[in-house]
Amino acid sequence: MRFLSHFSMAVALAAAGTLAISAVPQEAHAKKKKKDKGDKIEMSKEVRPKVAAIQQAIASETPETAKPLVESLLAEPLTGDDQFVAGQLAIQLGSKLKETGLQEKGINASLASGRTSAEQLPAFLFFSGNFAYSAGRYPEAQQRFEQAYAAGYRDNNIGALIAEAYFKENKIQEGLVALDNALTAQQTAGNKAPEDWYRRGAGMAMKNNVNGAAGKWTYKLVEAYPSGENWRAALSVYRDSANPKLSNQENLELMRLMRKADAMESERDYFEYADAADPRRLPGEVVSLLEEGLAKGDVPSSSSYVKETLAAARGAVAADKASLPASERDANRSANGKIALATADAMLGYEDYAKAAALYQSAITKGGVDVPRAQMGLGIANVGKNDWAGAKQAFSGVTGSRKSIADFWELWIDQKAAQTSAPAPAPELAPSAT
């Protein structure tokens, strides 16, 4: 049974990360390179008086009178230096009048002239792309952004904007590749990308059913920002996008991690977990789980599901516990590991991690069982013992459909170990007596 579809979570993730641009084109104009004599701009005789008239109008108390003159000059079939000068005048006037349309025409004219300096070129390409993006011309924006990036431009979140332009074109795969490249560039530069970038990638991957990508992006999200909320989002998105769907046992292994990562948030999380554990199969674990949910206030005591499930689990605990010694003896005598595996599951549910680990290891050694499933159990039992090295060793041996779940467990262990090894804050010194 599935109690909750997390598609709404994917929509929320996908909505994150849309980026606003705060820079303005005059910044690019201000960085204009001082040209050496070899780069000297020389206007034609026909253009010089028109430029003089425009400059005079711009410098006057009514600079708006220069607008028709600039637009007229831009409309002429100019090339080279004349086109570059016309573009620069348009940028200057557009900045003064705060008219982005005129600035865009100026930047594009400057680029088309072929006379934009190497120093100005990256920023001009970026702002040209930004104007196109704002106007909804996404293919043009994507092309300009990529040209700017190739020319060395790195400001204004350009890497993420390239991805956004692809997303706007509904080119999801290309957008995810571009966003991944942007994350890598941030890491290479020694920076940490914003959380919204990761959430955007995860949301777009799931919302658009990109095969295998949702799990990879949610992993990236919790790797960079390991909050309980993100762990919940990551594990839920991974589970709901898994292809093929997770088995009940695999879902239980995932929900156990959600609980460890302090990512159990709603009654539906607890119901999903309890359903996967099954009060008839692992009554001790179901009792522990639902009582924890009640204590935290995450599970309502008035819920008929809670009442019925908790009653069934509590009613089965005594007989289940009483059967465990015989199950242990049978597991030790058995030629294969099937009884050992089942008994290890029960011990794990009662948080008897040492016995559970020994029985899982016995099941693996004797054989005749699903080894990746037993390896997962061994890893989780070792986590319960705080045996991080043993847990990682067990998880690293998991193959097949469970590998991604084991990878999430290993990531959580690494983060837990990092928290444990972090230096404690220095104690505050008491004020000296006077």
Image (cartoon, rainbow, N blue to C red):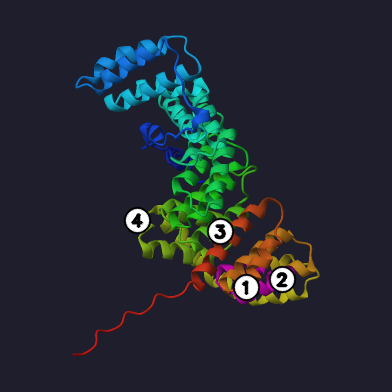
Quarter of the image for residue 359 reads: bottom right
Sequence-earlier tag: 1 or 4 = 4
Dot 2 falls on a residue whose secondary structure is: helix
Label 3 – label 2 distance at C-alpha: 21 Å
Q: Earlier in the sequence, mark 3 or mark 2?
A: 3
- For disc 3, the marked residue is 277
Across and down, in percent, residue 204 comes to 51, 37
Name the element at disc 4: loop
The structure residue drawn at horizontal position 56% and vertical position 51%, both measured from the top left corner, is: 188
Question: Given the image, on which type of amino acid does mark 3 rest?
Answer: Ala
Label 3–label 1 contact, CB within 8 A: no
Residue under pointer 1? 323
Residue 193 appears at what percent x and percent y?
Answer: 48, 49
Tell me the distance, in whole angstroms, between the alpha carbons under discs 4 and 2: 41 Å
Q: What amino acid type should be assigned to the residue bearing mark 2?
A: Gln
Q: Is residue 220 left or right of residue 48?
A: right
Q: Nearer the viewer, mark 4 or mark 2?
A: 2
Q: Is residue 21 above or below residue 334?
A: above
Element type at marker 3? helix
Q: Amino acid at mark 4?
A: Ser
Residues under numbered marks 3 and 2 in contact, where contact means CB atoms less than 8 Å apart: no
The amino acid type of the residue labelled 1 equals Ser
Kindly report which numbered mark, 4 or 3, lies closer to the viewer in this rendering. 3
Q: Nearer the viewer, mark 3 or mark 1?
A: 3
Q: CA distance from mark 3 to mark 1?
A: 18 Å
- Report the residue marked by disc 4: 302
